[in-house]
Image (tube, rainbow, N blue to C red):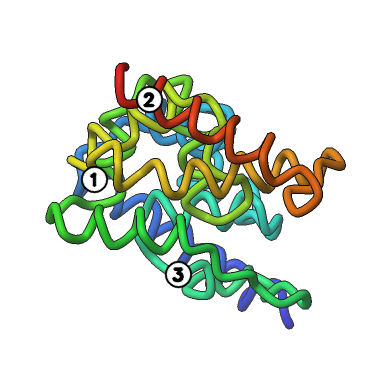
Amino acid sequence: MSTKSKSIVNLKSSEKLANFLVQNRLHKKDFAQMVGVTLSYVYNLIDNAIPFSTRSTTLERIAVVMDISPEEFIEYKIPQEPLVVDETLEFLREKIKSKNMTTLQFLKAFPRKKRVEIVDILRGARPIPLNWEEIENIAQILDISKEEIYVFWESRLKQVLTAAGFNFESNKEFGNTLLNCCRKFIEKS
């Protein structure tokens, strides 16, 4: 690919980003925090002072914030490993849609320092938090009942315990007692 055609490709991605920021009245600093990059990096991308990112993580984060597929960026290389479909992620995406929210509106409901973590959850790179207070905050923003979100939280807790070596089958009574205590605590909170 010639240098001239590369700059056109970069310009197109840069223009997409610039147009998104203008159309959504999103400050570059807020965008940078959501994506986990510096403000100067965002300015350089928009000004086409540097090539548009080819790093999958960065492109996926940008795509999540822009509510587009990362494949819309010519620089994006499709990962070779198969994607795992996460029920929790699909559930959250459906709830965002059912509330007629954009991903950007959803992200703005969180404190600035938390947004990049939420972006990583939405792109499937990070599981939902194990901390109930954090998962409850997500549920409140999307008007999800405790009972509805608990199912996903319990599944996440089981994943963590199983990965740490806990066998739910051979410790069935203990596991059920633990989960019952969790349910009671959450019902009271």
Q: CA distance from mark 2 to mark 1?
A: 42 Å
Which residue is drawn at the image coordinates 50% and 25% (left, top)?
181
Considering the image in quadrants, where does the C terminus appear? top left
- Name the amino acid type tagged 1: Val
Residue 156 position in % (x across, y down): 58, 45
Under circle 1, the secondary element is helix
Residue 33 position in % (x across, y down): 48, 28
Residue 20 position in % (x across, y down): 30, 52
- Per the rendering, the mark at residue 184 is none
- Name the amino acid type tagged 2: Ile
In the rendered image, which quarter is residue 177 located in? top right
Residue 161 position in % (x across, y down): 74, 39
Look at mark 3 in the image and give the residue it sits on.
Answer: 69
Viewer-nearest residue: 94 or 180:
180
- Per the rendering, the mark at residue 186 is 2
Under circle 3, the secondary element is loop
Q: Residue furthest right?
A: 165
Whether label 3 touches label 2, CB < 8 Å: no
Within 10 Å of the Cα at label 3, are there few (<14), some (14-19), or many (20+) other Cα atoms?
A: few
Q: Is 95 on the left or on the right of 173, as rendered?
A: left
The residue mark sitting in front, 2 or 1, is 2
- Name the amino acid type tagged 3: Ser
Within 10 Å of the Cα at label 2, are there few (<14), some (14-19), or many (20+) other Cα atoms?
A: some
Which residue is drawn at the image coordinates 34% and 35% (left, top)?
138
Is 107 rendered above or below residue 38?
Answer: below
Q: Which numbered disc flags the more N-terminal residue, 2 or 1?
A: 1
- Per the rendering, the mark at residue 22 is 1
Is 128 rendered above or below residue 10?
Answer: above
Q: Which numbered disc flags the more N-terminal residue, 1 or 3?
A: 1
